[in-house]
Image: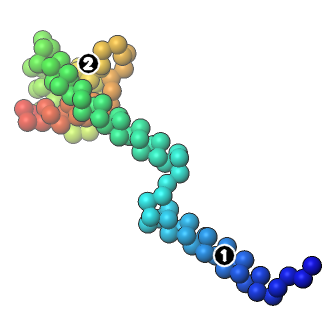
């Protein structure tokens, strides 16, 4: 079987084109792997749930008999300790959960910033 002499340059060109297409597609074309898409989806759904539960957190803060002392503690605390204070108060713990939700605590703290 005779292979034409243009076959090798054509295959090298096709391979280089495929590599260039993949580089351009993943870097600038918006392509992503299934794992990256799943992570993006998880992040978005976590943010949506936290946003939806923020009124619940604010209601917990309003109904808490210790709210005045917690708010005073929030006023004096450093910014990086405030989320922990909201979590410790139990305001960011959804019904049926044992642990507070971090994203909910951050959203609740953002909503409480008006009163701090």
x 7%, y 32%: residue: 115
Label 1: element kind: helix
x 12%, y 36%: residue: 113
Which residue is the site of mark 2? 90
Label 2 packing within 10 angstroms: few (<14), some (14-19), many (20+)? some
- Left or right: residue 97 versus residue 19 is left
Label 2: element kind: loop
Q: Where is residue 66 drawn, in percent x and y? A: 14, 14
Label 1 packing within 10 angstroms: few (<14), some (14-19), many (20+)? few
To which quarter of the image does residue 75 belong? Answer: top left
Q: Where is residue 29 drawn, in percent x and y? A: 44, 64
Q: Where is residue 56 drawn, in percent x and y? A: 20, 21
x 16%, y 30%: residue: 74
Q: Is residue 3 above or below residue 26?
A: below
To which quarter of the image does residue 104 belong? Answer: top left
Q: Specify the quadrant that holds the C terminus.
A: top left
Which residue is the site of mark 1? 14
- Left or right: residue 49 versus residue 28 is left
Q: Nearer the viewer, residue 81 or 94?
A: 94
Q: Examine the rendering and report whether any part of residue 32 can be seen.
A: yes
Q: Earlier in the sequence, mark 2 or mark 1?
A: 1
């Amino acid at each position: 079987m005779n292979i034409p002499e243009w076959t090798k340059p054509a295959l090298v060109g096709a391979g280089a084109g495929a590599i260039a297409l993949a580089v351009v597609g993943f870097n600038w074309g918006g392509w992503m792997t299934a794992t990256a898409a799943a992570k993006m989806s998880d992040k978005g759904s976590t943010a949506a749930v936290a946003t939806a539960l923020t009124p619940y957190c604010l209601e917990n803060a309003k109904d808490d008999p210790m709210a005045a002392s917690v708010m005073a503690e929030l006023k004096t605390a450093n910014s990086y300790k405030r989320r922990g204070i909201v979590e410790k108060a139990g305001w960011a713990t959804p019904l049926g959960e044992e642990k507070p939700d971090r994203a909910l605590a951050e959203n609740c703290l953002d909503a409480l910033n008006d009163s701090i």
